[in-house]
Amino acid sequence: MNDSTRERLSAYLDGALSDSERRAVEVEVSRSEELRLELEALRAVSTAVKGLPKEKLPAGFLARLEARRAREGAAPEREYILLPPAYRPLAFALSTAVVALVVWDRTIPQQELTQKIGWESDTVAVKSAADAPPSIDLSGKLSSGGSAGLADENDKKKEAAVAAKGLSGTFGKNLNAPGKPVEISEDRVAAAAPAESAPAAEGFAEATGKESFSARNEEERSAINERLYKGFEEEKKRMGIARIVDKGSEPDNLPMGGRDLMALQASPEAPRLDGGAMKAMRGASAVRGMAKDSAPVYKALALKTPEALAAAWAAAALPGDAPEIDFSKDMALFLAGPSGSGIVSVQVRKKLIVVLYKETGFEDAAARVRATPASPKPVVVKPAQ
Amino acid sequence: MTAIGSQQPVSEQDFLEKHSELVFNLALRLTGNRSDAEDLAQDALIRALRALPSFRGDSQLSTWVYRITVNAWKNRVRAEKSRGFWKTISFGAFGNEKDDDSPEFEPPAADAPLDTDLEKEGTAKIVQQALLQLDADDRAIVVLREIEERSYGEIGEVLGLAEGTVKSRLFRARAKLKILLKVPL
């Protein structure tokens, strides 16, 4: 028995067959026990459904119907769920505009920054060497192909600017206590940016900083801070920064600004920071606040061009000319720190360059510079015993 | 008073008196519970009253009201299903899909003779639960055929289906009910 036959049985039950079809079915059923049973089964189903009781209208049904009619009569029937069809294009346009604004907000600043900086390849290395003292996490890692004779002019200019900017905010601070390890403060991780791009970048930093923290209530600012701080921590991990200490005795105590970040971006061989990370770092600075009256900042700039050394020298307001360094085979380590201090010795280790310094109380300019074989190693600054 | 084609004018009062209970019972079998049935029936009757002046009498008034009721039900199921918060247990799904909110069907005991115990409320409940396992169109076809005793042509008119489609779908629905109700061969 196929479905066609059973379907005819179903129609037979309903009296929906023609006379000839009906007679044919009756003959088939009389000859087949299977067909008869199937017909009885379908009839039982039909009877079962037909047996469902008819119910009276619930009490008050018509009164409630009239009340509902009155309510719905006052307001025209709505055939849509959210918006009248005429308003949907407008809603679509508005939502598209909002999405575009968000995308623009997240992408344009970074593009502008790249354009204003004018270079993309230079980076700064900030790593913690495995054998580095726990207090220092700055490196002066250089480009591996970086002999002075081979470096192009742009590299030299950038390095010079890095050196000059890095020094400009470092000198004139209180002396560190002898024997105390030097720590690099968060906003002095980097050196500096090229002079011509710094103002524009500062403007950008200010603008984005205000965008993040102005005109928001406390709860929103708190949420932003949390987000930025999380990004900052992730960025630290990505860059290999093991530890960042609170800022030293900086008189201005300003949060990390665009200049510092651009310098970080500009220094050799560190991963590039995207706009989000830069915002995160600025935000983190603002959130954490700055500790005052801590130790002055010392760092050794690893310089690979005479221009860079000259710029560092000038920025530190040191007398005379910088010492001669054969940049074809060496790089210059320049001690950036309070006046009256100088390099005692440089230890070139397998994976690390350690610069030992000493505070003498008088300015010996030449003592700030040491030549060392160019090598892309982290640089650590330690007080000489 | 509303003139209905060539028929005698029908007042809203007459219309409601003749069709309210019919619409409510259809809604009850489609939805499976009185609360949803009342809401659906009122919705359908309000729509019908609103459209009554434009009724041309091309079909029987009852068929026209059935169509309004079934369409209101299907629209409601579709809308609420798409919005995802229609939690009634009374609606099946469209097409061949089963409504996720349909209750678990409890088959009758094997020794329950359906044709003799229909008076019993328990048996009626079992049959109603079995109906709810059918998809929307099949359920409507069964209800219109078995309870409202409409012809294939009228059912097709209500649901917008060809008579042949009604015939084959009714057979498939009965075959499924036969399994659900454990009707012995």
Image: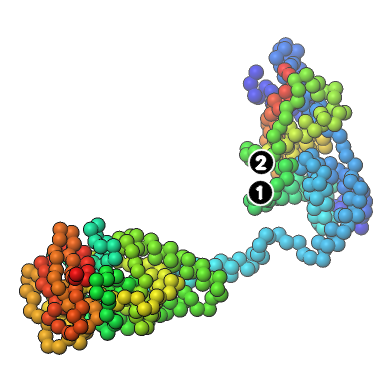
> Image quarter for residue B22?
top right
Determine the secondary structure under disc 1: helix
Query: Could you tell me which residue is drawn at 42 percent across and 79 percent down?
Result: A207
Residue A256 locus on image (x, y percent): 37, 76
**Dividing the image into 4 quarters, which one contains the C terminus of chain B?**
top right
Residue A67 locus on image (x, y percent): 87, 59
B105 or A189, which lies in front?
A: A189
Type of the residue with mark 1: Lys
**Apparent side of residue A161 relative to residue B108 in the rendered image (left or right):** left
Rate crowding at label 1 as few (under 14), some (14 to 19) or many (20 or more) other CA atoms within 10 Å.
Answer: some
Compared to residue B16, the image places residue A169 above or below, namely below
B98 or A31, which lies in front?
A: B98
Query: Could you tell me which residue is drawn at 87 percent across and 54 percent down?
Result: A65
Q: Give the chain letter at badge 1.
A: B
Residue receiving disc 1? B81
**Dividing the image into 4 quarters, which one contains the N terminus of chain B?**
bottom right
Residue A209 visible from this viewpoint: yes
Residue receiving disc 2? B99
Residue A165 visible from this viewpoint: no
Residue A237 locus on image (x, y percent): 34, 60
Rate crowding at label 2 as few (under 14), some (14 to 19) or many (20 or more) other CA atoms within 10 Å.
Answer: many
Type of the residue with mark 2: Asp
How far is the residue under mark 2 from the one under mark 1? 9 Å
**Co-location on one chain, circles 2 and 1:** yes
**Apparent side of residue B52 relative to residue A167 in the rendered image (left or right):** right
> Image quarter for residue A314?
bottom left
Q: Give the chain letter at badge 2.
A: B
> Image quarter for residue B129?
top right
Query: Could you tell me which residue is drawn at 43 percent across and 63 percent down?
Result: A230
